[in-house]
Amino acid sequence: MQLRAHFLQPPLLPRVAPFLVFIALTFCQGCFGEAAGYWLYLAKTVVGGWMLWVVYPVVEEMRWNLSWEAAVVGVAMAGMWVGLDDLLVFLGFPDSYPKMKLSGTGWNPSAQFGHGAGLAWFFIVVRIAGSSLVVPLLEEVFFRSFLYRYVARADFLSVRLGSFA
């Protein structure tokens, strides 16, 4: 319990440490072979989620504040993100932006563990949960709660969330 109290003491650490640990584990993902990358993704998702749970009491900006406007904008943006590429091709702009060509097989648990294998489905669920539940919270706490406000003023807690003047 004393370690937790020390970790949560300065206002900077709870906002920065979870993101930096997650990034450090991300850099390790390709270091131990292809199959280890899946297990490291699981580890960094669990560690990131646990760290968010630990810092939740001291990061006041993490409180839920839902609005129907935000939900509508979120759904619209997701639709644009997914559907815009096909729409641009349909409108005659197939090369409207540069597309990255990745080498290698990429992240494909079905190819790694077998099509329809339980382990493949497990890692698919882990990836979806990590990408949609843990990563956005880590990024919001680091970027919006700390970095953007720190750029505005070194005493970042004196900058109201959402204002960067």
Image (tube, rainbow, N blue to C red):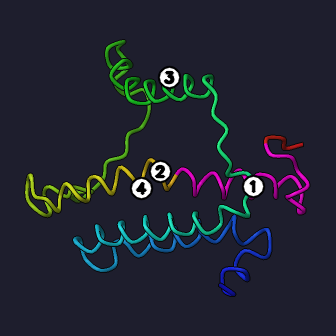
Q: Which badge, 4 or 1, comes first in the chain's sequence?
A: 1
> Going 75% across and 55% down the picture, which residue do you hit?
60
Crowding at dot 3, Cα within 10 Å, few <14 / some 14-19 / many 20+, comes out as: few
Instruction: Check contact, mark 4 vs mark 1: CB within 8 A.
Output: no
Q: Which residue is mark 4?
A: 130
Which of 156 and 6 lies nearest the eye of the viewer? 6
Secondary structure type for disc 1: helix
Q: Is residue 138 above or below residue 74?
A: below
Residue interval drawn in magenta: 136-161
Q: Nearer the viewer, mark 4 or mark 1?
A: 1
Q: Amino acid at mark 3?
A: Ala
In this rendering, would 139 be left or right of 88? right
Q: Is residue 84 above or below residue 21?
A: above
> Going 64% across and 28% down the picture, which residue do you hit?
67
Could you say where residue 115 lies in the image, as x and y percent from the top left?
8, 53
- Extreme-front residue of the structure: 1
Q: Amino acid at mark 2?
A: Leu
Q: CA distance from mark 4 to mark 1?
A: 22 Å
In this rendering, would 146 be left or right of 79? right
Q: Which residue is mark 2?
A: 133
Q: CA distance from mark 2 to mark 3?
A: 19 Å
Q: Which residue is mark 3?
A: 76
Q: Is residue 65 above or below residue 102?
A: above
Q: CA distance from mark 4 to mark 2?
A: 6 Å
Name the mark on residue 60.
1
Q: CA distance from mark 3 to mark 1?
A: 28 Å
* The quarter of the displayed image where residue 88 is located: top left
Q: Amino acid at mark 4?
A: Gly
Q: Amino acid at mark 1?
A: Glu
